[in-house]
Image (cartoon, rainbow, N blue to C red):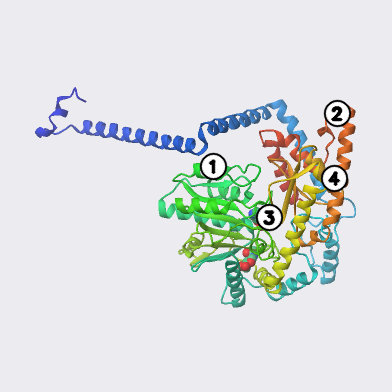
Amino acid sequence: MSSNPTARKRGGGVPIPLIEILSMNYKLIQNIVLVLFLWRWTRKAYYQLKGRGIFGSTFDFYRYSRAWLYGAFFSLPGVKSKVQLRISEAKFKLEKKYVPSGPVVERHLELPKDGWGVDKVREELGKLHEMKHTMWEDGRVSGAVYHGGEELIKLQTEAFGMFTVSNPIHPDVFPAVRKMEAEVVAMVLALFNAPDGAAGASTSGGTESILMACLSARNKAYQERGVTEPEMIIPDTAHAAFLKAGEYFKIKVHLVSCPPPSYKVRISSVSALINPNTVILVGSAPNYPHGIIDDISALSRLAHKKRIPLHVDCCLGSFLVPYLAIAGFDTEPFDFKLKGVTSISCDTHKYGFAPKGNSTILYRDKKLREYQYFVTPNWPGGVYGSPSIAGSRPGALIAGCWASMMSTGEDGYISACHKIVGAAKIIEDAIRTHEDLSTDLHVIGRPLVSVVAFSSRTLDIYAVSDAMTAKGWHLNALQNPPAIHVAVTLPIVEVVEQLLGDLKEVLQDVNERDRKAVAEGKGKRSLASGDASALYGVAGSLPDKTIVKELAKAFLDTLYKA
Ligand SMILES: *Cc1c(COP(=O)(O)O)cnc(C)c1O
Ligand SMILES: *[C@@H]1O[C@H](CO)[C@@H](O)[C@H](O)[C@H]1NC(C)=O
């Protein structure tokens, strides 16, 4: 440019040739783009390093490459066909387990030409009800059925019957349903010490509540701060629904480890990961895997200081955590009394004992709730708005939820808290102190609510899990670290001693098998057989999760096989 004299004579009134202006602008634009590009990547690199440190970033890179290499290995033609074969075998087993077949099973794959009479439907329903299953009725199932008391079931069914056709999308047609729904939300808000101006909504379950909290935070960050590449920071023990929210709503998820001995989220790591794209922080009270309450006070201080929303997941804690203190148990702060807490999810269908399909999402203020609303003004079907994911919703469930809460009442929930948390303490205590349990097992962290997770340094814990399954129990297998847990519910309260007795027997059996295997020169693991061992044994220990994902998808397919 400088070689061209006209450029230097700009001030002298000589017009600059058009082509030169264009090329100057082109260069300028090119430079701006380059600077923006560099700025963007420098910023990204800066926040990556700030968030994970040099060591952590190198480790991330190593882990990523290792998984990639394994993935590449498994897609080699020879390897791939072998893997596919194993997966088909597993699929076959799954179908055999879940889809009843044989001459006695009548399958219905098309509508009956003539509708069945009422009696026939009743009879068939009766048979379906009797289908062989893990006996939750006898308290054999961890979590899953939270009440199951006959009287409450009867009341819920009556409530369903009265409101079968109702749908809160038409409040003028079903005013009672609107009233009950608003009251359910108000009662849960009060339970969690919501301040004036707080607001909430009901949803179809904990997952939807969590999805809504993440959506609201994402929309808030976009509208108030123009954040277009949202990120959230969650404990790695937080519920899978947060990962779902990340996937559905395109929010990048940062997982923070929850190291022993406390197994609470490491606050310094959360703090390091915060950057201008952060839209929400998360803590659990308590989490699903280990039943541990994160340090919500510290998260709250951090969130408040950085002005970032903080969601506390009380889906599981639901109606137990708020009553821990009153029932005489240790507790930790977790609710709206902490000023950094901006939203809470609480499942009425867990320890609220409502029928399945019911949860609430609570917000510190109305504006936050508004960010989850969907409204479209120009739809030919009319101006349309809905508070959450569903359009039409079952009014019957509202009635069932309302009836459950009103009939249980504060005294009912406090007494349930006594029984359930009391039973969890008995289990925890036994594992810590009964020698025939404590030699092989140790409790993970210090659980304060209803879940007790435990692991083993001497035995394959998945073998223990599978042996318990063989005895008719359904405990939950966990991973990273390998462990199992019991989520105590009212049906389990009655059979705690039986559970501990069977656990002792199982430990003896597994120990004996291990001793034999070692004596015969075989590895301990080679003996394990069963669902948990299969899923978390060899396949689970590989860095690339393709096989595990394929198995999980096969399982989901199986659910829809008639
Ligand atoms: C159960 C649970 C949820 C939500 O699960 P849903 O099955 O969708 O109700 C969320 N968080 C925790 C800790 C839970 O235990
Ligand atoms: C769950 O309960 C609420 C009332 O709290 C109700 O509005 C809702 O319809 C229920 N079910 C579903 C699937 O949303």
Q: Which mark is residue 522?
A: 2
Q: Amino acid at mark 1?
A: Ser
Chain-order first, disc 1 or disc 2: 1
- Image quadrant of ligand 2 equals bottom right
Report which residue position mark 3 lands on: 448
Neighbor class of circle 1 (other Cα within 10 Å; few <14, some 14-19, many 20+) is some
Q: Alpha carbon of mark 3 to alpha carbon of mark 1: how far?
A: 24 Å
Chain-order first, disc 3 or disc 1: 1
Q: Alpha carbon of mark 3 to alpha carbon of mark 4: how far?
A: 24 Å
Neighbor class of circle 3 (other Cα within 10 Å; few <14, some 14-19, many 20+) is many
Horizontal side of 219 relative to 475 (left or right) equals left
Q: Alpha carbon of mark 2 to alpha carbon of mark 3: how far?
A: 40 Å
Is residue 168 or residue 115 the one in the foreground?
Answer: 168
Is residue 124 or residue 153 the one in the foreground?
Answer: 153
Figure check: 255 above or below 473: above
Horizontal side of 125 relative to 343 (left or right) equals right
Q: Position of residue 444 (x, y in %)?
A: 71, 46
Q: Position of residue 84 (x, y in %)?
A: 74, 34
Q: Alpha carbon of mark 4 to alpha carbon of mark 2: how far?
A: 25 Å
**Dot 1: element:** helix
Chain-order first, disc 4 or disc 2: 4
Chain-order first, disc 2 or disc 3: 3
Q: Amino acid at mark 3?
A: Leu
Report which residue position mark 4 lands on: 436
